[in-house]
Amino acid sequence: MIYLVLGLGALFVGLGYLITEKNADTLLSGYNTMSKEEQEQFPLTEYLKCFKGFHLRFGIVFSLIGVMLYLTNEELLGWHLGITPILAYIYFFYQVRDLYKKMESQKNYFKIGIAILIATLAFVIGMFFWSDRPSIVELDDQTLKISGPYGIELPLEKIDSLRILKTLPEINKKRHGFSTEGVTKGKYKGPEGDCLLLIDKPYNKVLRVGRKSGGPILISLKGLDEEKLLLELKESLELDTL
């Protein structure tokens, strides 16, 4: 994760130097869609000065905050990666608002850009709160129920194997889901095909629940005794070994 933080920080800094007056008509979003007349009216030199300064400062600050969180609280690192850039670009749009207002045709572009960033920020924050909900396991005579993000209700009759794993199998691809320093939940592709991961980190044991269809479920949750759940499932299924 720290390499991702440093890589993104370097990318933000690099953006400030990458876009110049010579290539802005190709690389600078918004400017590259203006007509020739609009480009001539737009204060490009002043804008690029703000653009470069912002990306240089933000790249450095982003990396420093990321390193600090990596060393002190890794669970907040995912929030930093997802939210800080959006907040920064909202600030940047506000910082250069007067440059857009100098051009009547660009006033709506500024408003739309701010609105999209704010909507994206609200969505990302909502996703983080949704993903942080705890997963709760309940077992009755007929169903294994797991509430929370990517929760599932699995009829016991659809279970075809059970075992404890010491480590997760190698994951090749994420179908959809999320993975942070604290959790990995969602549908992933592993060596056995698609599987559902419900993992709180760090973990010591993983309960693998094989299904007759749909791929296995890999479970390791805070407060859950995986071996106890394994025995309860075997008892419910009235099997000595499964």
Image: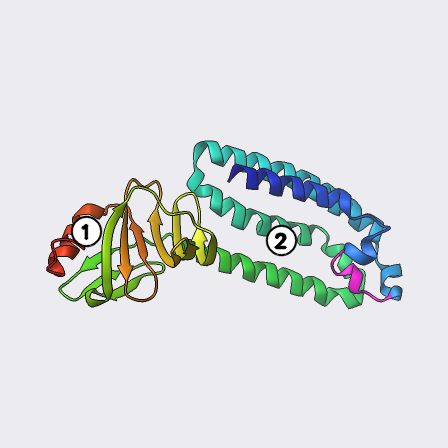
Q: Residue at x 42, y 56 (%)?
A: 188
Which one is closest to the eye, mark 1 or mark 2? Answer: 1
Q: CA distance from mark 1 to mark 2?
A: 49 Å
> Is the C terminus in the top left, top right, bottom left or bottom right quadrant?
bottom left
Left/right of residue 65 with respect to residue 102 in the rendered view: left
Is residue 98 positioned above or below 52 on the image? below
| Mark toward the start of the polypeptide (1 vs 2) | 2
Place of residue 48 in the rendered image (x, y in percent of width and height, measured from the top left) = 79, 48
Place of residue 64 in the rendered image (x, y in percent of width and height, measured from the top left) = 57, 34
Place of residue 185 in the rendered image (x, y in percent of width and height, measured from the top left) = 38, 54
Left/right of residue 28 with respect to residue 135 in the rendered view: right
Q: Can I make out residue 35 in this image?
A: yes
Q: Is residue 10 magenta?
A: no
Residue range of the region highlighted in magenta in the rendering? 28-35
Left/right of residue 192 with respect to residue 81 in the rendered view: left
**Residue designated by label 1:** 230
What secondary structure is the magenta-colored segment mainly?
A: loop
**Residue designated by label 2:** 90
